[in-house]
Image (cartoon, coloured by chain):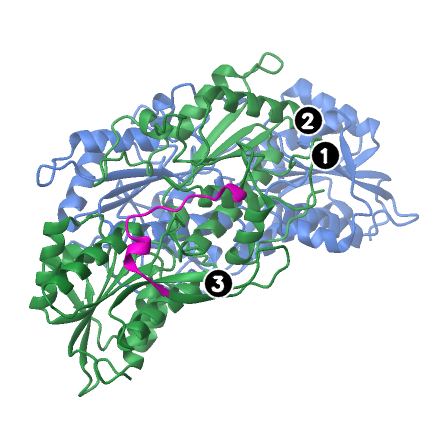
Chain colours: A green, B blue
């Protein structure tokens, strides 16, 4: 243990949409701090505190004392989905961050860990700069988390692999449902700006089946990402083509699809929608986009034998981000980034974000390996990563490279037999 | 093996909404027939055929030959969700059943197995009566299947335990999501006439937590079943009470809730809805009911601190009936009822349905046991079982007896830790 540790308390917070593994990271930080002796007599790190509902709780003095939280309960907590400390949607501005720093001073906090997405890393960055300006030594670390998988530098982010696993399994089962009672099925999947989670639906397909036109006979046959401008007429034409070919069509649509002017299709459709701190219409927790696309197809597609084509839409909703069937890689890495952040803090590093960097090549059958790396807070703060062009194929599909990228993250999927 | 077996082929069909274990029953019948020597030289049962999309395929002569289907692929098929043979929504009337019988004669079918719900058992009943009337020896068996759990006589039906497992796990995760970012959350769950699946959401609660008023602090705190008349004003009041108490509210609503005149709330709300063979508006594959209840709460609930209360709705949709995380009890029993039906047919029984009868008492900690029993086709045909009064508590909850009934069926659920 470094001898130049500043004496004081540590605090950990969780922010933004919860995931199935965000508590792994919380437990990782606690374990990392305990390993450095936090809470032991004479150790400079006195207490390990938890913010109740992120910075909201910190500024209100609403803190848990986790210093002596029992080891066995921590292990169950790590496997518990959603944010055990409570989360927040507050997006602090400068004035708010000043109150965060004041609260740190008041509670003698010298180690600050914030688990979250790009907004949370921005909170870390601002608080860190303010601490530097006032010469208050605060070791300030951001720990990545988001099912959207949209943090810069990172190969992927904790939370994404487990959510992708749910999406892949749900689409697999729903595709088998779709061939048993044929028709058109739309599934709306999370991701306002980045299409990674919707793209993961492609893992539902079995490799060995493609039709004469080279398309997949397995669903989803059509995948619509926020990165590709959505054109309503082209969508209807796409569905009609697949339906004519197979007598059925299985579709994955991102909740974040936008037209070529960048207007959110869902945002325009959701009436009585509530807006978040950014003024965006809340896309999750509403079936409006799926229902509207379903109505559109019922209206536009030619009836078969005088009967309207069977169209159904499901919106996967919140269950996809917290379903308790975590990817093992995700669990291990979420714990790992938490531990790594604690290690950085007790090794003399003053600030930073932890990134997951893949060290193995992306390719079929390649064994997967990754490492953690400290990066600057400004490398990730308030920035959004999108699906790179090499992961996208045409206007309604993902590439083989994306499948090779994603497959090792989600873990093994059930085998299926089709007669 | 009985020596008075009639010589001919066997056919198996799957009908209605698919489940995660309906292929277990298909494989069970095949295994039962093979055990009796079906397909072996000299055996009276010559071929094992599969109807492609149920009676639709049978009447069109669209049949699979499963006689020599490889054993190892059968084992994977058994674990594959959804109807491997394809399903149908056709509800045969007398004329249709006559064509079914004609097809049986044409394909020399003497053993008829139909896996499905109450409509499918009615098809069996009619076809069986017609066969008797024309002195065509047809051994006609219905094998139970429905996530709705609404077949008479049966303690429960194959497919229900796995769907209930999904509902319980999804509600558990979603409740943890709800306490991390508090607000009001509505989950709409399948079941047009019977509330069993919605009731299974109560398994998401941990036993050891109740509030001072004796209610659950764990979600769902409010459960609305089709068996209890739904009153909009009372619903708003219920939610307001829980929200005032906890600052959050987690709600499970059956898609089949109806007002006191018996009008389906969802049916009235879903615009552009498609109707099934019974003329009912299709409730699944639409987010309309959840969105309408959500809008209602946003409109009626008093804002907190000048801000509209956060309300979200998810509709679990088709994924709940086929998600590949089957209950082990369900897998075993679905296979068991299939094998049992085959055994009845080769033991000289002429017709019937297989029922699952619980032989252990319902109560906390009681080891679960059940047996299969032959019942008359007319015992289940076209009848619907509802949640018995002893499983319902008040107008928005289920009883301890229901929990004791349901818990052994779904299998072990993940442990959770709350700080």
Q: Quadrant of residue A380?
A: bottom left
Q: Earlier in the sequence, mark 1 or mark 2?
A: 1
Q: Residues within 10 Å of mark 1 (few under 14, many from 20)?
A: many
**Residue B183 or residue A163, whichever sits in front:** A163
Q: Where is residue A114? Give x, y as percent.
A: 25, 61
**Residue A125 or residue B242, whichever sits in front:** A125
| Mark 1: secondary structure | strand
> Which of pointers 2 and 3 indicates the residue nearer the eye?
3
* Magenta highlight range: A374-391
| Mark 2: secondary structure | helix
Q: Where is residue A166? Give x, y as percent.
A: 47, 50
Kindly identify which residue carries mark 2. Answer: B56
**Residue B256 or residue A368, whichever sits in front:** A368
Mark 2 and mark 3 on one chain: no
Q: Residues within 10 Å of mark 3 (few under 14, many from 20)?
A: some
Chain to which mark 3 belongs: A
The residues tagged by marks 3 and 1 sit, at their Cα atoms, a distance apart of: 42 Å
Are the two marked residues, 3 and 1, in contact with CB atoms closer than 8 angstroms? no
Chain to which mark 2 belongs: B
- Visible in this render: residue B21? no
Mark 1 and mark 2 on one chain: yes
Q: Quadrant of residue B57?
A: top right
Q: Residue furthest top?
A: A306
Chain to which mark 1 belongs: B
Residue B350, relative to residue A93: is it above or below?
Answer: above
The residues tagged by marks 1 and 2 sit, at their Cα atoms, a distance apart of: 8 Å
Are the two marked residues, 1 and 2, in contact with CB atoms closer than 8 angstroms? yes
Q: Residue at x 38, y 35 (%)?
A: A256
Kindly identify which residue carries mark 3. Answer: A329
């Amino acid at each position: 243990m470094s001898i130049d540790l500043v004496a004081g308390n540590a605090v950990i917070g969780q922010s933004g949409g919860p995931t199935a593994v965000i508590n792994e990271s919380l437990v990782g930080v606690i374990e990392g701090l305990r390993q450095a002796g936090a809470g032991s007599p004479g150790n400079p790190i006195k207490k390990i505190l938890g913010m109740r509902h992120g910075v909201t709780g910190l500024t209100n003095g609403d803190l848990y004392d986790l210093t002596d939280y029992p080891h066995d309960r921590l292990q169950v907590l790590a496997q518990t989905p959603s944010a055990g400390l409570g989360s927040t949607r507050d997006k602090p501005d400068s004035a708010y961050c000043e109150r965060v720093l004041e609260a740190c001073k008041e509670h003698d906090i010298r180690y600050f860990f914030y688990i979250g997405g790009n907004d949370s890393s921005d909170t870390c960055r601002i608080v860190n700069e303010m601490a530097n300006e006032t010469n208050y030594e605060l070791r300030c670390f951001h720990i990545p988390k988001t099912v959207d998988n949209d943090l810069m530098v990172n190969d992927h982010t904790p939370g994404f692999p487990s959510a992708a696993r749910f999406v892949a399994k749900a689409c697999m089962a729903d595709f088998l449902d779709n061939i048993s009672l044929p028709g058109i099925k739309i599934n709306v999947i999370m991701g306002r700006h980045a299409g990674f989670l919707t793209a993961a639906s492609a893992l539902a397909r079995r490799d060995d089946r493609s039709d004469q036109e080279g398309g997949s006979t397995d669903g989803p046959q059509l995948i619509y990402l926020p990165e590709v401008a959505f054109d309503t007429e082209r969508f209807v034409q796409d569905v009609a083509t697949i339906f004519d070919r197979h007598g059925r069509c299985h579709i994955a649509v991102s909740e974040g699809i936008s037209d070529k002017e960048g207007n959110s299709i869902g945002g325009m459709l959701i009436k009585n929608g509530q807006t978040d701190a950014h003024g965006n219409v809340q896309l999750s927790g509403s079936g409006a986009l799926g229902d509207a696309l379903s109505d559109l197809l019922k209206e536009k597609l030619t009836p078969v034998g005088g009967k309207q084509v069977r169209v159904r839409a499901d919106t996967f909703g919140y269950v996809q981000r917290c379903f308790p069937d975590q990817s093992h890689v995700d669990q291990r890495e979420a714990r790992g980034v938490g531990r790594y952040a604690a290690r950085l803090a007790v090794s003399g590093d003053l600030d930073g974000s932890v990134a997951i960097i893949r060290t193995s090549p992306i390719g079929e059958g390649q064994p997967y390996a990754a490492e953690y790396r400290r990066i600057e807070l400004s490398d990730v703060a308030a920035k959004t990563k999108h699906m790179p062009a090499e992961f996208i194929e045409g206007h309604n599909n993902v590439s083989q490279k994306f499948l090779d990228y994603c497959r090792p993250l989600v873990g093994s999927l059930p085998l299926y037999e089709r007669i």
